């Protein structure tokens, strides 16, 4: 039977919630997507835009989505509907929740394909396949993987099964426990690789590339890419944080928790850049080589290191762990919706949702091979899913969330819930009501005009 509000799950502790939220935020968005977007979008110009978007846009919207979710204690659609009704507003705000769930669903379909790449590379690196290979050989291996629909399907399926098993177990036993184990391990390995780079060349060039200001490359396209990635990496605008907030007790301080999540997310993203770009520069590779960056550059280094097979295996294993902690959060809103609004149990809801995501993922992976000639407005299915979510759905859904909190909900109750004094409350009002919404609109409209 569908669960009711009284049976709604809760995080076992605020610490567990923080780890789960960080696990959702710190994933492929930091380790796979951030470095290649830096390369494609002007290096430090993108980093500057990204940090700006995190602080003034990502942070308040993250808080807003948690607040909405905690108020509603249901799936994102019902949460928006019920909270709006309690504020005397139209229940049509549920459309925002539906759009968020759809966005997360679409993202997971291609996200799981990339998770499959990481799983595949665990076996490749561990077997020593890249030992002594040059960049051309490593790139050829990656291209061969993309060209094989069968290989991609197998690993995409394995990744989705892992995700479904964890989500099916439940919020505390599955999602929370997975985050407690996997995220600390990822951080340790990532910083070990940064330490290796400090000792082995290319590090100074990478630091300059990431942090030396170059505002000449800052334009509307870079700002939109940074905004989209801020939404992607913080898991906002896709129903996740509303769903996670619905499992949240009143004892958790939303502002301090959001600050912790944003800081950790940023540190991991920048560390990923310092783990990858020194290898790129020291091996004469192109930093703007796109989504395959991590699967071409890092294997070269692992192939030349004394313990490269061991470290490389751990690295891709932990990238997989990071991908899983994010994928379970992407699947959760859809599962929560099915569990609450249909007679299906959590297990059945998870199976149904996972199969639907898996099928769309098949279409996404086929765009690299059998369906490579099929395009949607000039993009293959994989790229189309990425662009429509990160550049359109996530910003607009997040914009709706901050407008809902800033302009539709009772402000006195929000001040009390956030525990803000008069000065900090006025600052929050300025950011939530004006800065964040206007910034999203300006960047979004500018991108449409370019």
Image (tube, helix red, strand yellow):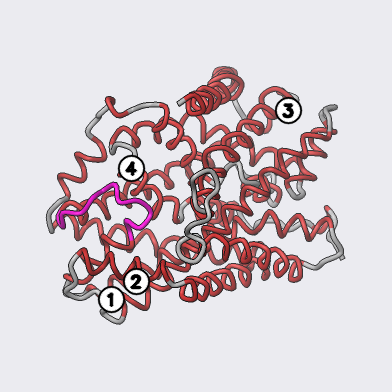
Percent position of residue 63, x then y: 59, 37
Label 2 residue SS: helix
**Which residue is drawn at the image coordinates 33% and 63% (left, top)?**
295
**Which residue is drawn at the image coordinates 85% and 60% (left, top)?**
342
Residue highlighted by disc 3: 413
- Say whether marks 3 and 4 touch (CB < 8 Å): no
Label 3 residue SS: helix
Residue highlighted by disc 1: 310
Q: Earlier in the sequence, mark 3 or mark 4?
A: 4
**Which of label 2 and label 4 is nearer to you?**
4
Q: Which residues are magenta?
A: 282-294
- Say whether marks 1 and 2 touch (CB < 8 Å): yes
Q: Earlier in the sequence, mark 2 or mark 4?
A: 4
Q: Earlier in the sequence, mark 2 or mark 3?
A: 2
Locate residue 43 relative to residue 219 in the image: left or right.
left
Q: Residues within 10 Å of mark 4 (few under 14, many from 20)?
A: some
Residue highlighted by disc 2: 314
**Which of label 3 and label 4 is nearer to you?**
4
Name the foreground residue: 132 vs 382: 382
């Amino acid at each position: 039977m569908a669960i009711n509000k009284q049976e709604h799950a809760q995080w076992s502790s605020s610490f567990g919630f923080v780890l789960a939220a960080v696990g959702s935020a710190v994933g492929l968005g930091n380790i796979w997507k951030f470095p290649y977007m830096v390369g494609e979008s002007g290096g430090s110009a993108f980093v500057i835009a990204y940090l700006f978007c995190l602080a003034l846009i990502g942070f308040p919207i993250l808080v807003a989505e948690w607040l909405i979710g905690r108020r509603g204690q249901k799936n994102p659609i019902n949460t928006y509907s019920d909270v709006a009704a309690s504020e005397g507003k139209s229940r049509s705000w549920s459309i925002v929740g539906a759009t968020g769930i759809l966005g997360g669903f679409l993202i997971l379909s291609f996200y799981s394909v990339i998770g499959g790449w990481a799983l595949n590379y665990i076996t490749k690196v561990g077997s020593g396949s890249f030992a002594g290979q040059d960049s051309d050989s490593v790139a050829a291996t990656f291209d061969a993987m993309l060209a094989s629909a069968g290989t991609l399907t197998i690993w995409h399926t394995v990744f989705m099964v892992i995700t479904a098993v964890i989500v099916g177990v439940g919020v505390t036993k599955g999602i929370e426990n997975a985050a407690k184990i996997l995220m600390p391990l990822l951080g340790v390995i990532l910083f070990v690789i940064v330490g290796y780079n400090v000792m082995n060349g290319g590090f100074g060039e990478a630091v300059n590339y990431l942090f030396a200001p170059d505002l000449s490359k800052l334009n509307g396209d870079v700002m939109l890419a940074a905004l989209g990635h801020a939404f992607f990496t913080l898991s906002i605008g896709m129903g996740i944080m509303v769903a996670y907030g619905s499992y949240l007790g009143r004892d958790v301080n939303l502002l301090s928790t959001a600050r912790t999540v944003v800081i950790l997310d940023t540190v991991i993203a920048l560390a990923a850049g310092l783990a990858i770009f020194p290898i790129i520069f020291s091996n004469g590779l192109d930093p703007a080589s796109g989504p395959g960056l991590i699967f071409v550059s890092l294997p070269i280094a692992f192939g030349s290191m004394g313990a490269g097979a061991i470290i490389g295996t751990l690295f891709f294993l932990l990238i997989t762990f990071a991908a899983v902690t994010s994928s379970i959060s992407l699947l959760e809103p859809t599962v929560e919706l099915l569990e609450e609004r249909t007679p299906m149990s959590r297990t059945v809801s998870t199976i149904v949702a996972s199969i639907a995501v898996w099928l769309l993922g098949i279409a996404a992976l086929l765009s690299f091979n059998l369906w490579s000639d099929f395009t949607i407005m000039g993009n293959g299915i994989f790229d189309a899913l990425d662009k429509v979510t990160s550049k359109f759905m996530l910003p607009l859904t997040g914009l709706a969330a901050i407008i809902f909190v800033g302009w539709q909900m009772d402000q006195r109750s929000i001040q009390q819930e956030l525990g803000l004094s008069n000065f900090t409350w006025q600052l929050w009002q300025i950011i939530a009501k004006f800065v964040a919404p206007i910034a999203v609109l300006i960047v979004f409209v500018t991108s449409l005009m370019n």
